[in-house]
C-alpha cells in the first residue's frame, strides 16, 4: 500500500538559509499535518491543511510557511534558519471523514549548522 | 485544553518481563481519540492502536494490551514477555472532537523503554 512520502529525508543547512520540505500524502487523503520533533522531545503540531485550505495552526514560527497544492502535496518553507530548527519534521495525512487515523511519513531530518 | 502526561521518562527491564507504560490525559471534549505510537531508533512513528472515547473495551494484540479507563482518564499500555526488539520510545497521543473530522494529535512526552537481554 502507498504510504506518505517525504523529501528530502535528510537536509543540512547553514544558519540564515532557507529550506523547503515536501510531503506527498496517501492517495485520496485530503488532510495533511506537519509536526516538528526536536531532539529528545515529543512531536509538536505545526500546521494542517484540508482541501488546500489551512485548517489549524499550532506553534509554527512566523519564519515558516506552508501550503497544500492542487494535487494535495504540501510544502513547508522555512526561512532564516536557526540552530533550534534542527529537528525531525513529520508529515501525516488522513481522510477527514475517516476515523482520524493519521498516517505518518518517515520524516525529514533537518540539521542547521 | 488538551494534555497528555507520560510520567515515566525511562523504563528499563530484563527481557521476558512484563512492563506497563502509563498515560494520563486531559480534555474537556466528550469525543476524542487516544493513540499509542512506537518510535524505534530509526526515527519513524509506528502506529500501534487507536481508541475512541465511546469504546472503553480493553484490547489485546499479541503481546500488547491496552487498558482504557475514562474514570481515571488513563490509557495504559502493557507489553507482556518483553523482547529486545520492543526497545523504543513510546508516545501516547490524544485528538479531540473527531465528530468534526480529523484533528491534530497532542503527544505525551514519551517513555523510553529499554529491554535488556
Image: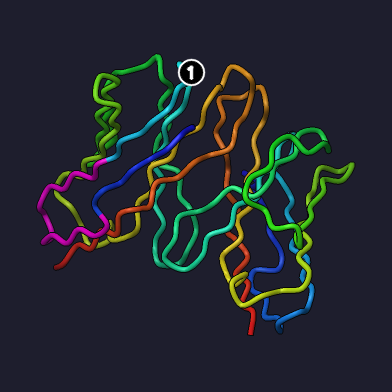
Q: Is residue B103 left or right of residue A67?
A: left
Q: Give the range drawn in magenta.
A: B9-22
Judging from the image, the colouring scheme is rainbow
The one of B25 and A68 positioned closer to us in this rendering: B25
Residue A103: x percent and y percent?
58, 43
Give yes or no for residue B47 being in the magenta stretch: no
Up the image or down, B5 lies above or below A30; here it is below
Q: Is residue A1 left or right of residue B67?
A: right
Residue A19: x percent and y percent?
77, 70
Q: Quadrant of residue B23?
A: top left
Chain of the residue on which disc 1 is drawn: B
Q: Is residue A59 left or right of residue A77?
A: left
Q: In which quarter of the image is the C terminus of chain A?
A: bottom right
Up the image or down, B30 lies above or below B13; here it is above
The one of A17 and A96 positioned closer to us in this rendering: A17
Give yes or no for residue B17 being in the magenta stretch: yes
Q: Is residue B30 left or right of residue A71?
A: left
Residue beneath the point at 29% across and 35% down: B61
Q: Which residue in the structure is indicated by mark 1?
A: B31
Q: Give neighbour class at mark 1: few <14, some 14-19, many 20+ (Cα, 10 Å).
A: some
- Total tally of numbered discs in the picture: 1
Residue beneath the point at 70% across and 68% down: A8
Residue beneath the point at 42% across and 31% down: B34
Mark 1: secondary structure: loop
Residue beneath the point at 76% across and 79% down: A16
Amino acid at each position: 500500500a502507498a504510504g506518505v512520502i517525504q523529501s528530502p529525508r535528510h537536509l543540512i543547512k547553514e544558519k540564515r538559509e532557507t529550506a523547503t520540505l515536501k510531503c506527498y500524502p496517501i492517495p485520496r487523503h485530503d488532510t495533511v499535518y506537519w509536526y516538528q520533533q526536536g531532539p529528545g522531545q515529543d512531536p509538536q503540531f505545526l500546521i494542517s491543511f484540508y482541501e488546500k485550505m489551512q485548517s489549524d495552526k499550532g506553534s509554527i514560527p512566523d519564519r515558516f510557511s506552508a501550503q497544500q497544492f492542487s494535487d494535495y502535496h504540501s510544502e513547508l518553507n522555512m526561512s532564516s534558519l536557526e540552530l533550534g530548527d534542527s529537528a525531525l519534521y513529520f508529515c501525516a495525512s488522513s481522510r477527514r471523514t475517516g476515523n482520524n487515523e493519521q498516517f505518518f511519513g518517515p520524516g525529514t531530518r533537518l540539521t542547521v549548522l | 485544553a488538551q494534555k497528555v502526561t507520560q510520567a515515566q521518562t525511562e523504563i528499563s527491564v530484563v527481557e521476558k518481563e512484563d512492563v506497563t507504560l502509563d498515560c494520563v490525559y486531559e480534555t474537556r471534549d466528550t469525543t476524542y481519540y487516544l493513540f499509542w505510537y512506537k518510535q524505534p531508533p530509526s526515527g519513524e512513528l509506528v502506529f500501534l492502536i487507536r481508541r475512541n472515547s465511546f469504546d472503553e473495551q480493553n484490547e489485546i494484540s499479541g503481546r500488547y494490551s491496552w487498558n482504557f479507563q475514562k474514570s481515571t482518564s488513563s490509557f495504559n499500555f502493557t507489553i507482556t514477555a518483553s523482547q529486545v526488539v520492543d526497545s523504543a520510545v513510546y508516545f501516547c497521543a490524544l485528538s479531540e472532537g473527531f465528530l468534526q473530522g480529523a484533528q491534530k494529535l497532542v503527544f505525551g512526552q514519551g517513555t523510553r523503554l529499554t529491554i535488556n537481554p
